[in-house]
Each structure stands twice: as C-alpha cells, then as structure tokens.
Image (cartoon, grey):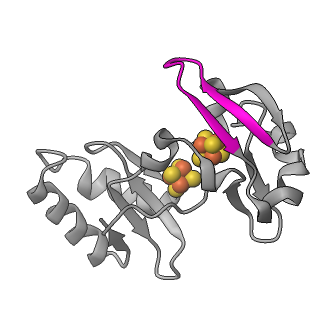
Amino acid sequence: MAFECQQCGECCSIMGQVLFVSRDCGDRRYILTNRYTGEKTLVEVDPDKIALYEDQSTTRRFPESCPFLRFREQDSRAYCTVHLTRSDMCRDFGCWRLLILKPDGSRAGRVMYLSHFCPDDPDLARLWEEQIRDIEDPGDEAWDRAVITVLTGAGYSVRK
Ligand code: SF4
Ligand code: SF4
C-alpha cells in the first residue's frame, strides 16, 4: 500500500537543521529555504491551522524542529502547519517500507531503508533480535515475506 504518515513528528522534529525561514513575506507567508540545496519554497500557514501555528510550545520543546511543525495536545499528533504549500521534498518523503502495528492499531515499529529497524515496542525489539535479525538478504521480496510471516505469527499486522 502507499506510504501513510502516522503523524509522529519524528522526521520534522529535526528538520530545523535543514530548513529555515529566509524571508517573512507577511500575512503568514514565508520563504522556506533548504540550507543544503538552496531550494526556496513559498509556504503559507494553512487557514485551518493558524491558532496551532501561533502556539510556539513545539518550537520550545524541540529547538531543532522545522519552524512549521506543531504538536497538538488534543490528539498528541504532529501537524505540518503549511501542509497545503509544503515543498516537494516534504511531499515525497516516506519514512518506512514496512510499518508494524499492534493488534490495537498503534505503531510497534518500522523497517526503514533496507532492513534498518526502528522499534517502538520492547517485545517487538526482542522478537526482532531472536527471530528476524539473522534472516538473510535484507530488503528483497523473499526477505519481506519471511519477516512478515514471523511478525503476523506473533500477532502484529504489517503494512507495506
Ligand atoms: S513521515 Fe514518518 S517519521 Fe515523519 S511524521 Fe510521518 S510517520 Fe513520523
Ligand atoms: S514544512 Fe511541514 S512537512 Fe516539511 S519539514 Fe516542515 S513541518 Fe515537516
């Protein structure tokens, strides 16, 4: 299935190292510049996210975050407050190739590029060490099938 962002905010929490506001154009419109590629994007705070954008608590908590990332208290999710006008780099970004979910639908872990594993759950981390880590040929289709068989056998569901 297509990549589906879980709005955890991890990626955008460090994107202040890459993206910075190089010009305030007024009316909550800004030039956002990529300090490595020089790419500039005119972004505008989404009309339905103005109040969220004006709450600066995310920036205080995560000083290296993108200037437009905000965590919303009500649902503990991360929001891009310039979602409608974000750059192509942000539109194209996908952080996982396998998303591993617990029976209640919450995230247990992710497999990123090739077999790089990011657990959120200690039981899954243990299962990975004991039954998955040594499966050969990480990243190919047979590896995916073998890994998914172990994970689903242990009660997880997997999105690909
Ligand atoms: S792209 Fe991935 S790391 Fe970034 S917010 Fe979405 S789920 Fe989290
Ligand atoms: S512009 Fe939006 S998607 Fe891109 S890094 Fe910032 S908060 Fe994340």
Quarter of the figure that contains the N terminus: bottom left
Q: Is residue 84 magenta?
A: no
Asked if residue 50 shows in the view, the reply is yes
Return the residue nearer the eye: 133 or 114: 114
Identified at 74% across, 35% down, the residue is 30
Which secondary structure is most common in the magenta stretch?
strand
Identified at 51% across, 44% down, the residue is 90
Q: Is residue 33 magenta?
A: yes
Left or right: 82 in relation to 116: right
Quarter of the figure that contains the C terminus: bottom left
**Which range is magenta?**
29-43
In the displayed image of the protein, which residue is found farthest to the bottom?
Answer: 104
Identified at 68% across, 50% down, the residue is 82
Q: Looking at the rendering, which quadrant does residue 27 occupy? A: top right
> Which percent across, then down, holds residue 19?
63, 28
Return the residue nearer the eye: 2 or 115: 2
Q: Looking at the rendering, which quadrant does residue 13 occupy? A: top right
Above or below, comparing residue 125 to residue 23 in the picture: below
Q: Count up the numbered dots.
A: 0
Left or right: 131 in relation to 54: left
> Which percent across, then down, holds residue 28?
82, 44
Quadrant field for ligand 2: top right
